Image: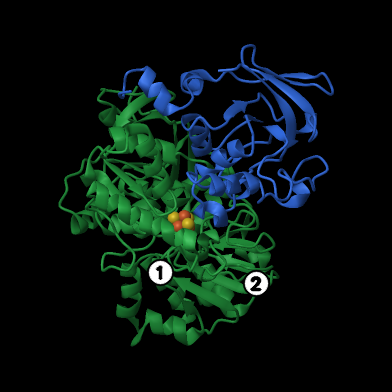
Amino acid sequence: METIKQGKVFVLGDDIDTDQIIPAAHLVYSLDHPDEKRKYGEFALSGVPIDKSGLPDGNIPFVASGQSESPYAIIVAGKNFGCGSSREHAPAALQIAGVQAVVAPTYARIFYRNAVDGGFVIPVESQASLVEHFQTGDKAEINLTDYFIRNQRTGETFPVKKLGQVENIIEAGGIFAYARQAGMIGE
Amino acid sequence: MGMTITEKILAKHSGGASVSPGENIWIDVDVLMTHDVCGPPAFAIFKKQFGEHAKVWDPEKVVIIPDHYIFTADKHANRNVQLLRDIVAEQKLPHFYDVGTERYKGVCHVALPEEGWTRPGEVLFGTDSHTCTAGAFGQFATGVGNTDAAFILGTGKIWVKVPETMRFVIDGEIPPYLMGKDLILQIIGDICVDGAAYRTMEFAGTAIEAMSMEERMTLCNMVIEAGGKNGVIAADATTEAFVQARTNAGYEIFHNDQDAGFHSVYHYQAEDLQPMVARPHSPDNKAGVRELKDVKVNRAYIGSCTGGKFSDFLAAAEILKDHPVKMDTFVVPATTEVSNQLRETNINGRSLWQIFEDAGAQIGQPSCAACLGGPDDTFGRLNADEVCVSTTNRNFPGRMGSKSAQVYLASPYTVAATAATGRMTDPREFFA
Ligand code: SF4
């Protein structure tokens, strides 16, 4: 696993639920058809009320209209990110839009599992909410060797938690790769 | 130290003698449930990972219940049901409740108990977050994503982190105007939407012991709205009577050890509680219904896995039998069995079905319907800026369709009382 992630930051508030990450009406598309799969990128975070989309100012679409990729590779969000349904389409949609990592103080359990086991995005836990310390469009660097995130605009650095027991799964790239490495399932 | 119910079930399924909270363990799965939204992608991952010709680990343990996007013209949604049919045929899966057949049921979390798939002491995983509903039967039940489901399909195993247990003891006698929904909205409001993150919520106390299985299901259904991993209620005579009427399969009942360790213990007295709602746009945005008596409402919805069971309609009918609705009111039985019960059960010579029709409500076909919005032609979907009072379990922005709509979650009594008056109404106004 690359232990340093860099990119532009998109900032969101608390309790961003899976309906905001990918509204239920779009779940009909197949993740296996390339054309349909792109729709998940196109509609990623489209359920966030527009005044809350891209804090602190809001009114910033995560993905420009008609596009399926977002300019933002890092999401900085408040507590309980990914609450709501068990839809794996949520972390998948973020990945399809180009997100590499989310940084939030806490996650909803199923979102966290899905992000890790599917190898979609890395759910990094910050020690405290960093929403006040980032603005949408800032550049940031996440270091998963020394466990911090740095805001390149302000130069401020914040500690993040170690990945702990799931690190092996994240490093392998998901639960299947992990189980193969561990000899639990065949090649 | 002793173990909780959840810890004992997990220990048994991990093959070990004991487990403790925080530990990551691999466990054997008794039943895997999936539906039309997550089934096709879960099987696609299964094939990709285990090979084109791979077979599921045990066809007897895989249960497939299409329920989400059923009565719609949306071609992608219909394709998903067809994909399930193809998978079932290829894998020779015996437990498929297909649309358009006699076996069709409707909402999976209500169908599972009806069909005998919820059994004390077992481990149930489902590709749906409200799989936690089945904890009402004294089992470990929780939702997972498609990748985890695919892993289970191939191996019959999955890893879990053993959760700590939060215990909610509700004693006393539940007043006639209160329902399980009021209790759980109170609790979620008290601990907030992440108050039980990663943990078990166990419900106990004399009020719980006196509850029907359906009311217990309402409690466990919404533990996910507090971030809980699973809900659990110790199986008792009520549980056993229900389970034995639905299946011949064996089961095992677990109780907390005397010295089991809990993360926290909360006490409530049933008589002190009141009808509750969750205001827009979060299930923990609690308020007593009486505080909101000036809120005007123009849509009522009674349905879903948490509020579309037979007892939910019976409660609503108690009010609507004498009071016509003053707003668009949608009634969606969770399953075909509930739908049949609406036709077969009478109050003073009228069936519940007739009562709802006479009151001016529209009755839909068993499925998830507008609980999660769905395609534009979904029955009861909020398509504009409606203010809706609903027996469902989530009111996040856009959950029931339009982002401009507002949803208040409440008990079937409160929804019916509100439908009859046009403003948020405490059902005590109808219980003289
Ligand atoms: S009724 Fe609603 S909450 Fe229940 S399974 Fe269906 S969509 Fe989910």
- Which chain contains the residue that carries disc 1? B
Q: Position of residue B420 (x, y in %)?
A: 57, 79
Q: Position of residue B217 (x, y in %)?
A: 39, 54
Residue B321: tell me if it is visible: no
| Type of amino acid at the residue the image marks with label 2 | Val
Q: Say which quarter of the image contains residue B296.
A: bottom right
* Label of residue B297 in the image: 2
Number of residue marks: 2
| Quarter of the rendering occupied by the N terminus of chain A | top right
The answer to whether B241 is drawn above or below residue A137 in the figure is: below
The answer to whether B311 is drawn above or below residue A102 in the figure is: below
For disc 1, the neighbor class at 10 Å (few under 14, some 14 to 19, many from 20) is: many
Please report the residue visible at 84 percent of the width from the left and 22 percent of the height from the top: A154
Q: Colour of chain A?
A: blue
Q: Position of residue B53 (x, y in %)?
A: 27, 38
1 or 2: mark nearer the eye = 1
For disc 2, the neighbor class at 10 Å (few under 14, some 14 to 19, many from 20) is: many
Task: Tell me the green chain.
Answer: B
* Label of residue B333 in the image: 1
Q: Position of residue B315 (x, y in %)?
A: 43, 71
Question: Does the beta carbon of the residue at mark 2 sit less than 8 Å from ligand 1?
Answer: no
Q: SS class of the residue under badge 1?
A: loop
Q: SS class of the residue under badge 2?
A: loop
| Type of amino acid at the residue the image marks with label 1 | Pro
Callouts 1 and 2 close, C-beta under 8 Å: no
- Which chain contains the residue that carries disc 2? B
